[in-house]
Amino acid sequence: MEFSVNHPILFVLVAIIVAAVLGQSIFFLIKAWKRGVAIGMDKKKLRSIAATAGIFTVAPAVAIVISVIALSKKLGVALPWLRLSVVGSLSYEAIAAENTSLAMGLTGSATPNASQFVTIALVMTLSIMVGIWLVPAICKKLQGGMGKLEQRDKKWADVFQSAMFIGMIAAFVGFVFCDVSDAFSGNFKGLIPVCVMVVSALVMAICGLLAGKFKKIHWIADYALPVSLIVGMASAIPFTAWLS
Amino acid sequence: MKKEMTYMDQVHRWGTVWNLSMMAILLAFPIAVALIFKAFPDMNGLWKGLLATAPMYWAVGVIETVTYIPMLGAGGSYLSFVTGNISNLKLPCALNALEQAKVKANSEEGEVVSTIAIAVSSIVTTLIIILGVILITPLTPVLESPVLTPAFDQMIPALFGGLGVVFVSRNWKLAIAPVTLMLILFIAVPALNAGTVGIMVPVSVVFTLIVSRIMYKKNLL
């Protein structure tokens, strides 16, 4: 059988794996939903949480499709479809593919042959598998540790949890400012992410104020994050035109 | 009499079954391609590719797993480490859901809420990627158009602007030190950029935990 990076068999194999990923997500969704109902959580609230999560996901998911398109130019569509439906991200997959391609002398836009394709797919898969097996190995122990912490000192356990979230957010806030110093040398591109973040934060703050003032239109609070995300991303278009 | 399994025990049991099965299925892909096309890996390329890629990603993977599990909850962790895009999608989605439901992450309600949010997010992502793959030819010029590209390039700032304002305003005392440190580091160190932000998340989390412990002990929170 003659190999091509877009051979139909590759799509069939990937479709089977993607179906399994969907199966896992649906399984956990049903389990959590049933448990939520069993412990007396409001079904309406659960539906609203699911709806917000779904709407919020659309824009980032489209960004992932763009990553599939970017990787497909060299690797075909099937492998990027697989890699970005599980674990991977554009930066990681691109680095793994590039490192392996270079090691095999596959440079530029040349597409891999079957052996090179298998090698690239193996490196991509093996290099990023840690989380998949490590979670089963340590999740229960870590969760148990968190539970013990809560039993010992509930207030500290709450602070601990908030501190973890804040730590993660702080790293990304710092990242948004990583190129601002370029402005001193006349390159204002680094200010674009800062402006976008400010717009998004303002939209979120306005939604919060509106939700507090008009309690009847609670959907404002529910959809504030997706709205701020979309408005922030849209604002990048004029900011880029202005600052580039 | 056999003790009945709690919900959390079931999550861990099924999570282990699913993740280990997914690991086997993922590894089966390159093996299946090799067998179908009778093409065996280039061992030199495999070795060199792994050497250049794996050590860093294994180290980052271990640190990320330890860092993210307490934030994602059990069900959310099993799912997120299979479906990926944790810091830029699954975790913000879970955080927003916890905020929306007004429940704590370390409660059973929090576990349920974050699992539902991450599962829905994973399903929607998978379906949109499928749609994108089916429509890749007509979609490519649209999604790569110069008008839309800046919007998708700035997804992370747009995401953390909205998320940041909620969490930082609510925990501003906790946020001062880590936000200041991260701003200084990212502005002053040129090596810190989009490629290294994932490594800085655990650094920032550990730093915030140390500072918050000191503040907590001194009754400053």
Image: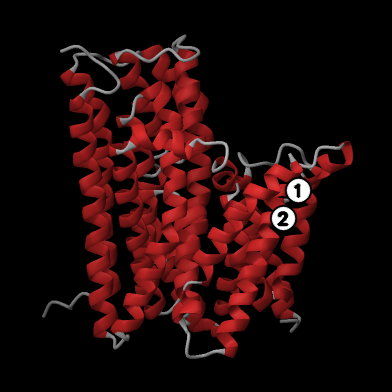
Residue for point 39% across, 55% down: B80
Q: Residues within 10 Å of mark 2 (few under 14, many from 20)?
A: many
Q: Is residue B12 above or below residue A153?
A: above
Q: Is residue B105 visible?
A: no
Q: Amino acid at mark 2?
A: Cys
| Quarter-of-image position of residue B90 | bottom left
What residue occupies the far top of the structure in this picture? A105
- Where disc 1 sits, the SS reads helix
Give the image location of residue A176, x and y in percent. Answer: 69, 51
x and y, in percent, of residue A15 in the image: 21, 39
Q: Chain of mark 1?
A: A
Q: Position of residue B95 (x, y in %)?
A: 49, 68
**Horizontal and vertical percent position of residue A78:** 30, 31
Q: Nearer the viewer, residue A28 or A69?
A: A69
Q: Which mark is residue A191?
A: 1
Q: Nearer the viewer, residue B6 or A17?
A: A17
The residue indicated by pointer 2 is A195
Q: Secondary structure at mark 2?
A: helix
Identified at 67% across, 58% down, the residue is A197
- Give the Cα distance between marks 1 and 2: 6 Å
User: Marks 2 and 1: in contact by CB < 8 Å?
Assistant: yes
Residue B75 left/right relative to B210: left
Q: Residue at x 58, y 76 (%)?
A: A207
Image side of residue B57 versus residue A2, left or right: right
Kind of residue at badge 1 = Leu
Q: How many marks?
A: 2
Is residue B43 placed above or below A11 in the rendered structure? above
